[in-house]
Image (spheres, grey):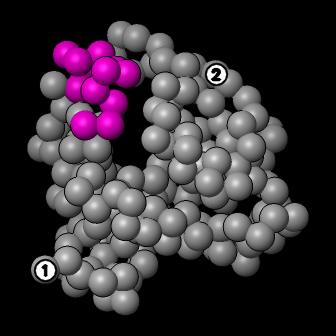
Amino acid sequence: MQSSQKTIVIRKAAEADVGQIAEILVEDWKRAYRGIMDSAYLDAMSAEQRYPIERRRYQKYTVAADGQEILGYAWNEMTGDETADCEIVALYVRYGRRKSGIGRMLFQNAVDSFRAAGKKCMVIWCLKENREARRFYESMGGQADRTGTHTWGNRAYDMVSYRYRLDEQSI
């Protein structure tokens, strides 16, 4: 039985969540980025390999939890780059739970937190070829802004940023 959104709690991540966070990231990358990123790089990823990385930074994360199950997480930073004062660095939802509103809940939580802190302009970057993520960010009111590249493994990938005016938009 699927849980309803009424039982989903948005909260700060705890150390006990790290294993599920690592699993979500690896599953999401392997499924969402297949055909976009280098297959050998994706195939080499594992939750065991990601665990120590996520353990070092889990305090930065906000999770969507249904009891002990982590359904997704976001990494929000109050400082951004030269064109924005805050950023959603990462936003992942358990692949089987996509399109269930969890991403919207995590996104809105970030917006609310940034607004409460007096932030005015938020940015989020994604792979240029990740059409699903781009549609989501556009549906949330984002305007494609800048492009750049990021290197994973031995390859650089094209990225696009989405900008959100927190002081002007109702997100």
In x, y percent, where is residue 131? 49, 34
Between 29 and 85, the one lying in front of the other is 29
Q: Is residue 138 above or below residue 115?
A: above
Residue farthest to the right? 168
Q: Is residue 103 above or below residue 28?
A: below
How packed mark 1 is, by other alpha carbons closer than 10 Å (few <14, some 14-19, many 20 or more), is: few
Q: Which residues are magenta?
A: 31-42
| Residue 1: mark | 1
Seen at 33% across and 30% down, the residue is 33
Q: Is residue 26 magenta?
A: no
Quarter of the image where the N terminus is located: bottom left
Amino acid carrying mark 2 in the image: Gly
Badge 2 element: strand
Residue farthest to the top? 154
- Residue wearing tag 2: 148
- Could you tell me if residue 106 is visible in this image? no
Amino acid carrying mark 1 in the image: Met
Measure the alpha-carbon separation of dots 2 and 1.
42 Å
